[in-house]
Amino acid sequence: MTIDGLYLKLDKKFILRADRLTIPANKKKQNLSALGSGLDRFNKILHYFKHIELKEVNFKNDHYSILYSDNIFYMVNDFFEIASHQISRDGDEIHAVMDLIYLREYDIRLSGKLVYNYKKDIALFSGSAEYMDIHADFMVSKKKKNLYYVIKSNSFSQFKSLVDQFRLPPKISLWMTNRLKAERYTLNSLKGAAKIEKKSIKLIPDTIVGEAVLEDVSINFKDGLSALKAKSMKIVLRDENLYFKLLKPYYGKKSLAGSSASILDLLNPKPVVLKLDLKFDTQLDL
């Protein structure tokens, strides 16, 4: 280990500043069961410090900035920012209050409580997320390489940007962002599963189940036709199908009260199946 630009001062508790800290890589594979004892030692060390500021920490090919002040631990690199306090251990579980997890690539801010069982490699993270004008509550559980998530949100307008973050299959993305548009969206629930891969997280599309309410809706079922419009609509994604329940729908000036629609086999490589149940009292000119 090498330290450059070291400053150390004792004022009841230690104040430590360093320009650069380089930690040599350990060739031995780290045992998860050692996390508990490692956290205990880490907390004992922090007890003697009032302030720690490490401008650059180099470990393997990663570079971090670390700050510890007022009992809050900050860590920043090119990909994320983390702020946390109350990191403790209870048996085989690590408990932490995450004040901030900022994911730079996605411009998403998370906060909440984390519980991690390091012997079973099981974790539960619940809290809130902020993205553009979206505020959402979430719960994510991890069991080894498997992730499971549940999300619900407030009313928001930046729907396309949100869908783009999930990298959904092209046909689902096309229908949810280009064919279907609304002034406001409320996500009642979205849940599904994902796999943790070496450098990414891969969603499992056929596990995704969701329900949303849309306001001032416009649906373009087919190019060349006018859009069907509705005061509001409930949309359900289930079993690889999209179901639309319309409130006060109309086409042109004609009411389509009682109408519904569905899009089937969204994950099928063949063209999707559009099913319309249109109800009207007079002739409908398409």
Image (cartoon, helix red, strand yellow):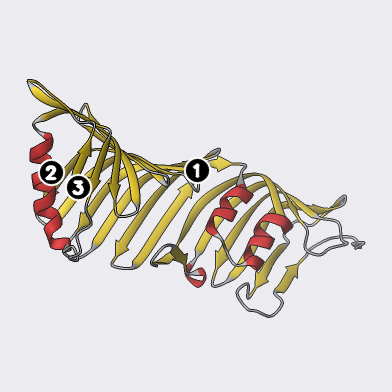
**Mark 2 neighbour density, 10 Å: few (under 14) some (14–19) many (20 or more):** few
Residue 150 falls in which quadrant of the image?
bottom left
Task: Identify the residue at image location x=73%, y=61%.
Answer: 259
**Mark 1 neighbour density, 10 Å: few (under 14) some (14–19) many (20 or more):** few
Label 3 vs label 1, nearer the camera: 1
Image position, residue 281 (x, y; %): 85, 60
Quarter of the rendering occupied by the C terminus: bottom right
- Left or right side of 96 for 259: right
Residue 91 vs 172, above or below: the answer is above
**Disc sitting over residue 95 in the figure:** 3
Residue 116 vs 12, above or below: the answer is below
Q: Is mark 1 on a helix, strand or loop?
A: loop
Q: What element carries label 2?
A: helix
- Left or right side of 22 for 252: right
* The residue positioned farthest toward the bottom in the image shown: 270
Going by the numbered disc 2, the residue's amino acid type is Phe
Residue 8 falls in which quadrant of the image?
top left
Label 2 vs label 3, nearer the camera: 2
Residue at image mark 2: 42
- Left or right side of 166 for 50: left
Residue at image mark 1: 107
Task: Identify the residue at image location x=89%, y=62%.
Answer: 284
Image position, residue 137 (x, y; %): 42, 46
Tell whether label 1 touches label 3 (CB within 8 Å). no
Task: Identify the residue at image location x=12%, y=54%.
Answer: 36
Going by the numbered disc 3, the residue's amino acid type is His
